[in-house]
Amino acid sequence: MLERQVSNFGNNVCFTPAVYAEPRDEAELLDLLRTHKDLKVRVIASGHAWSDAIKTDGLLINVKHFNDVRVSPQDDTVHVGAGCQIKGLAEVLSKQGKSLPTSGLIDEQTVAGATATGTHGSGKNSLSQYIRSVRVAHFDQETGAPKVSTIRGPSVELSAARCSLGLLGVIVEVEMEIRPAYNVLEFSARYQTLEQVLALESEYPLQQFYLMPWSWHWFGQHRTETTQPRSKLAALYRIYWHLGIDWALHLIIFVLVRIMRVKGLIRSFFKSVLPLVVVKNWRVVDNSQKMLTMDHDIFRHIEIEVFVRRADLKKALEHVKQIIQVFGGQAVSSDLQQKIPESSHGIYQHHYPICIRRVLADETLVSMTSPVNENDLQDWYAISLICFEKPTRRQGFFGFANFLALYMADHFHARSHWGKYNPLGRDANQQLYPRLDEFRSVVQKFDPESRFANEWLTNVLLSNQTSHAASTGTR
Ligand SMILES: Cc1cc2nc3c(=O)[nH]c(=O)nc-3n(C[C@H](O)[C@H](O)[C@H](O)COP(=O)(O)OP(=O)(O)OC[C@H]3O[C@@H](n4cnc5c(N)ncnc54)[C@H](O)[C@@H]3O)c2cc1C
């Protein structure tokens, strides 16, 4: 057991838990829960969440030793230890000709950490949806003693456990669906309108696309599963992505934002330089895991992501654009100009392509793409906004993100990603997640004394009290 200061990937959440522990097996884990019966408990995995999800002044548990992988090829499932990183799991699966059904932009997260916040890629459900059963260490409702239970479905408990934010207890193992390994065909192209990008969605269902700030044109990264073999130039394409995008593009943005700090240069870069240097219409086929991920974590940054339904996408993106313009100091003709306090005009210069990904509705209770009601299974679109400012200069971003999240929640029922900067308060979440009361009942069953909750989650999710909390996150 160690005492240590903990910080997350984005360096916006820093704290010192009373006790930090890395149990080696379930017996040690149960012992810890028994010994520290007066402490609140949270779990840390790879620490990639930007929200306060991992924060505690009690017992912080790291389950990195729980990383066994047992593949059952005959029924296309895998039992995987909660602390196994996605990349480790993907590697084992690939050796057996298998793959995960979907993947986020990076694969550094652990299986339990990624699913606990509804981590997603594009064109499929979130990873949480593919969980078939969960083994979780929690407290017995009758005796209060720690124990390990397996949650299976279909059941309301499994719907809660698929995306639980760690509130049901310490997940030790999950059983997930897997599928045969597959290749993905990808090419990129530039467009003038959203309709042009969306028109290719049925042919390229795994596509993601970008709204380029300041030039306001669209950039589609079109992707589809294919039976074609790996392209001869796939290795070259990987080098182009790694050196050209993961390193060079990010380095340029990093220098413009953190060192040069000239508004006009950032805008000119997006208007005039970027469109010329990004390679267009190069069609390449490669293994899905390689194609769907990138080294997006080389430069530390912070991100907010809001989810809107398909019917609201066009209007929501128009409003995101105008909010960026006003926070960047540009005048817009709509009433957003008046709705944003004048003191905020010009305080934040957005400086990264706005990534938009389609995510299908999940059978979960509180993941960002859980259905609004049984009859509304519309797809969701995740709109992500990334900031490369250093941690001490993020006030402008926080002002922008706080306004954006609340405005989008009010106007478009937009939900904020639990694993990214999430400033929504309890009242907004109560409106946004119709099955929140069911989620609270399941949490109560597995954790009758709220030992696994922290202050943030109690305030924004578990509390029945009306609050005016508008923002979370350590600045
Ligand atoms: C560079 C970068 C890229 C990203 N790309 C994407 C993306 O493409 N798509 C997307 O949706 N998200 C993305 N994210 C967000 C990220 O996937 C989530 O924040 C995810 O939750 C982080 O997983 P982690 O393993 O680091 O968990 P942590 O950040 O350590 O923890 C996250 C939550 O999971 C809980 N938890 C972890 N393990 C357990 C366990 N064993 N039992 C109970 N609770 C547990 C923690 O208590 C906490 O509440 C990205 C983040 C970064 C930094």
Image: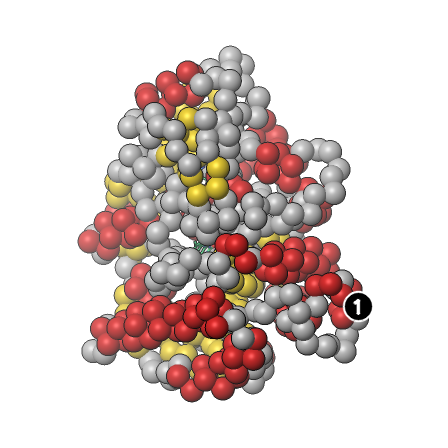
Name the residue at the top extreme. 143
407 with respect to 145 (left or right)? right
- Is the residue marked by circle 1 packed among few (<14), some (14-19), or many (20+) residues within 10 Å? few
Q: Residue 410 occupies which quadrant of the picture?
A: bottom right
Residue at the image position 39 percent from the left and 84 percent from the top: 277
Q: Quadrant of residue 468?
A: top right
The residue sitting at 30% across, 69% down in the picture is 242
Pick the quarter of the image with the N terminus: top left
Residue 425, above or below 299: above
Residue 15 at x, y percent in the picture = 48, 37
Give the residue number, with chain letter if any, for mark 1: 338
Question: On the picture, is 311 further left or further right than 145?
Answer: right
Q: Nearer the viewer, residue 277 or 186?
A: 277
Residue 339, given in percent of the width and then of the height, sits at 78, 64
- Residue 384: x and y in percent read 53, 62
- Residue at point 42%, 36% (across, down): 5
Tell me the residue at 32%/21% (across/down).
27
Q: Describe the element under mark 1 as helix, strand or loop.
A: helix
Question: Is residue 292 shown above or below 445?
Answer: below
Residue type at mark 1: give it: Gln
